[in-house]
Amino acid sequence: MTNPQYFDDATSVTVPTDRLAADPLPSEAAYQIVLDEAMLDGNARLNLATFVTTWMDDNADKIYAAAADKNMIDKDEYPATAAIEARCATIMASLWNAPSPTTTIGVSAIGSSEACMLGGLALKRRWQHARKAAGKDATRPNLVMSSAVQVVWEKFCNYWDVEPRYVPVTEEHPTLDRTNVTDQIDENTIGVVAIMGVTYTGAYEPVAEIAAALDEFEKKTGLDIPIHVDGASGGFIAPFLQPEIVWDFRLPRVKSINTSGHKYGLVYPGLGWVVWREKEDLPEDLIFNVSYLGGNMPTLAINFSRPGAQVLLQYYMFLRLGFEGYRKVQQESQDIAKYLSSEIARIPAFTLWSDGSDIPVFAWRLTPGHTENWNLYNLQLLLRAHGWLVPAYPMPDNLGDQTVQRIVVRNGMSMDLAKELIREIKAQTEYLDSLDGPMPHPKATDSFTH
């Protein structure tokens, strides 16, 4: 006879959380305890704050489970996985129009953060080699970028002793562009970071215009400044939805590109990629040859042991979708983003900052003068109480007095869910507008930290 009760002797025990228990638990009991606590997490599909993939199909889940033990660093033990990693890098080099995709170099990483670090290190090392060869000081490198860069670039400059030079974004110039890119450049500049998909708003920075401005700058000064493109999101969007935009290795000044396999690459976290235009753009002294577990292998990474499963998942997605499949998935996400932004634009309380026309991400602000009784943080908290995570946060630097709210549309966000979200936003906005007095105004640190 089956016991209908949830509790039994094993699941009823109390286990300490600050030290190891004295005795083991049955595996079923430990499994249930972990599963029960994890239920307190939010519903990932309703988290519109994150760019990270929250859904893959059943076959991907099977590959993930079967490959959970693979260590990407151990290419001697897992040569097939290593070959697939190289194959994926070649596919991306081709997707981004490298002059010779089969002879350039690219590697996987633990997300775009590590990939950015590797791209930045290559810029710094190339600059150092050139300075030393010319008999010049190589101790004061700087990196030029928009003030709207993702925090990883602040970390890169902090960790690797590079001076960050931020070009402030303004309402007139909401991204880095040709009018302001050269203002901070000098002979110590190791490169310029251009963003394909600004985290705050989803907008593309005009890489071709930036490259053209650097071409003109070189003619005047003789300084040859390379570009690294942070394509964490846009690297897997622009080739499929905006092939006419020239932003990649078609521009000779673009020396490296990073992207997140675990964002619009459609793979579970954490997986990033960085690819160099040509093999010569990656200094050889950044590559280590190490003896590990019986083999000698070249490595280019900040991390050492790391999962190989996500690399296999990336290859699965390339095989499963092909170019047209990726185009359809990304187009569906963008269609939903533009539907949502168009509906929000119809609500008098809001004014769009962007509409999802670049990557499927958009932001809006409270219409000036609409109300003094509530702000976007109030709306964020009300939506969260109904399961939706829709972050509000201040814009950077010169726009710091502007608060925006943002939606990221990913694979797994259906049109039905989008319509439910719009109904909830309208209902909560109507409630807030009905107030005859001010709500307590929470701050960014009380809710979402960008």
Image: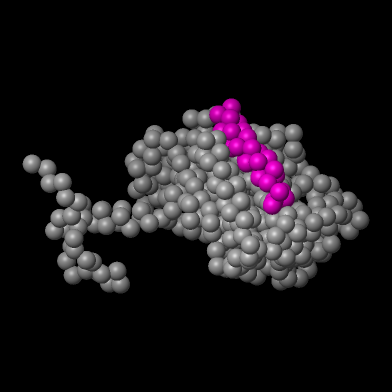
Question: Image quadrant of residue 184?
Answer: bottom right
Q: Which residues are magenta?
A: 324-352
Q: Is residue 312 covered in magenta? A: no
> Toward the viewer: 99 or 6?
6
**Residue 320 in picture, x, y percent from top left:** 48, 30
Q: Residue at x 70, y 56 (%)?
A: 366
Q: Residue at x 55, y 67 (%)?
A: 446
Residue 214 appears in view: no
Q: Is residue 125 above or below residue 96?
A: below
* In this picture, residue 166 sits left or right of residue 297: right
**Residue 178 in picture, x, y percent from top left:** 83, 52
Question: Image quadrant of residue 377?
Answer: bottom right
> Toward the viewer: 419 or 58?
419
Residue 23 appears in view: yes
Q: Residue at x 46, y 48 (%)?
A: 44
> Toward the viewer: 3 or 219?
3
Tell me the quarter of the image containing the C terminus.
bottom right
